[in-house]
Structure formats: C-alpha cells, structure tokens
C-alpha cells in the first residue's frame, strides 16, 4: 500500500501536476495553463482516485505491491486488487489531462521572443515528462484493466486466462519503466535550474541537455512502448 500511494499519488503527480502547474506558466510568461477547466477536472479525478485507494486501505489493503504482478494479482490474491486498479485507472486520466495541458501550454502560450532554444531546462524536462505521461499512462491503465477483468471474468479472454496474464504482465513490466522516467525528469529539471541559479552561470551544453530530454522521450516511444505489447 505504501508503494501504491507513493508512486501513483505522489511521485508521478509531483513533477508535472504540482511543479508544472505553478512553474511552467511563470517560466514561459503565460497567465495560466492552456485549459484551466481541464486542469480542474484533473484535480477532481485525482481526488476521486485517491478516495478509492483510501477505501482499499481501510478495508484490508492490497498485497500485490504497486506493480500488480500477475498471476498473483489476477488469481491468488484475496485483497482489494480491483479497487486499487480502479484507483489508478481514474488517476491515470488525471495524469493524461495534466500532461496534455502542459504540452499545449508550452507549444502555444510562450511569451513573444521566447523561442525553443531559450526555454529553461526545467521546461524541457517537464515537457518530455508530459509527453510520456500522455503516451505511457494509457499503457499502464490498459494493463490494470486486464488485471481487473481477469479477476472478474477469468474465462472471457482464453482458457484459464493465461493469455491475459501474459499480456498484463508484459505491459506492467514495461509501464514500470514509464513511472521511473516521469519521476526522473522532474528531478533532473529541478537540479538543472538550482545549479544554474546558485552558481550564477548559464548551463554548459544547454542544447545537449535539452535535446537529451527529448531523446529519452523519443527512445521510450520508439522502444519501450512497443516492446511492452510484444
């Protein structure tokens, strides 16, 4: 339960949702994010998902770990796996909305004269993390949908659910890497800005640092994403 709360309700949202909401508009000269109402909807979805996981905690918890590894989570566990999976399914929409909001904001609402090569490194890191959130979160949500459906309708996929087990296990193992990338981007962006501020010097090799953030996102899209479904 600690892992589920730590990963899904803190570490993933803290980068784009918390730091991004406050810092991205200020650092690019915008008054607000591109879609304020969508931003508010993502907050309500986050709180709704958090209430589900709170219910799961109070009614016995989940013993599968935050990775929901199969076949234990689909067949053998007697805890609130479906409730926890529903929590991440709802919170996943919040992550998608936030990532989409930040991507559009960076593209369309930069101050006049603020070109791509003048963006702060935090914006580059947050932009790359948002792209992965938009493209990677549905993969993990799909895996958890398979886990929940196999627990309820184990024969709906194949004999004894072995195909769904194999597919959900593969997708989950790849999606764990997605969570790691999203978490790391936020930290790397903060470190880049803090070092530049307190050393009073412009970042060395700005272009390489900025492009490396985008390169990681591109490598995930072209490599990790498709291999999770193989």
Image: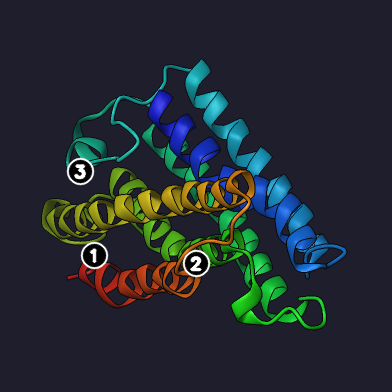
| Alpha carbon separation for disc pair 1 and 3 | 15 Å
Would you say residue 224 is visible in this rendering?
A: yes
Expressed as whole percent of the image width and height from the top left, the position of residue 124 reads: 55, 67
- Residue linked to disc 2: 128
User: Which image quadrant is residue 174 in?
Assistant: bottom left
- Quadrant that contains the C terminus: bottom left
At a point 72% along the width and 53% down the height, the residue shown is 23
Expressed as whole percent of the image width and height from the top left, the position of residue 220 reads: 32, 69
Q: Say if 38 sits above or below 184 in the image.
A: below
At a point 38% along the width and 63% down the height, the residue shown is 139
- Quadrant that contains the N terminus: top left
Closest to the observer: 179 or 67? Answer: 179
Closest to the observer: 215 or 57? Answer: 215
Q: Pointers 1 and 3 in contact (CB under 8 A)?
A: no
Element assignment for label 2: helix
User: How would you rate the neighbour count of disc 3 (Cα within 10 Å): few for under 14, some for 14-19, many for 20 or more?
Assistant: many
User: How would you rate the neighbour count of disc 2 (Cα within 10 Å): few for under 14, some for 14-19, many for 20 or more?
Assistant: many
Expressed as whole percent of the image width and height from the top left, the position of residue 35 reads: 78, 67
Q: Pointers 1 and 2 in contact (CB under 8 A)?
A: no
At a point 45% along the width and 69% down the height, the residue shown is 205
Q: Say if 83 sits above or below 24 in the image.
A: above
At a point 76% along the width and 76% down the height, the residue shown is 110
Q: Earlier along the polypeptide chain: callout 1 or callout 3? A: 3
Mark 1 or 3, closer to the camera: 1
Judge left or right: residue 7 versus residue 226: right
- Residue linked to disc 3: 70
Q: Say if 120 sits above or below 75 in the image.
A: below
- Residue linked to disc 1: 228
Mark 1 or 2, closer to the camera: 2
């Amino acid at each position: 339960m600690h892992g589920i709360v730590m990963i899904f309700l803190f570490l993933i949202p803290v980068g784009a949702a918390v730091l991004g909401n406050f810092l991205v508009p200020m650092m690019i000269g915008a008054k607000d994010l591109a879609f304020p109402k969508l931003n508010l909807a993502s907050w309500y979805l986050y709180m709704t998902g958090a209430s589900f996981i709170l219910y799961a905690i109070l009614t016995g918890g989940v013993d599968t770990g935050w990775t929901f590894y199969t076949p234990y989570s689909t067949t053998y566990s007697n805890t609130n796996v479906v409730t926890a999976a529903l929590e991440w399914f709802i919170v996943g929409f919040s992550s998608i909305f936030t990532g989409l909001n930040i991507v559009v904001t960076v593209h369309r609402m930069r101050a006049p004269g603020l070109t791509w090569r003048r963006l702060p490194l935090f914006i580059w890191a947050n932009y790359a993390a948002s792209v992965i959130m938009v493209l990677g979160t549905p993969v993990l949500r799909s895996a958890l949908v398979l886990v929940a459906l196999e627990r309820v309708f184990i024969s709906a996929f194949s004999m004894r659910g072995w195909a769904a087990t194999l597919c959900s296990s593969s997708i989950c193992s790849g999606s764990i890497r997605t969570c790691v990338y999203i978490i790391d981007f936020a930290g790397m962006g903060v470190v880049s800005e803090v070092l530049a501020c307190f050393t009073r010097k412009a970042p060395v090799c700005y272009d390489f640092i900025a492009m490396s953030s985008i390169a990681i996102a591109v490598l995930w899209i072209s490599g990790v994403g498709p291999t999770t479904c193989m």
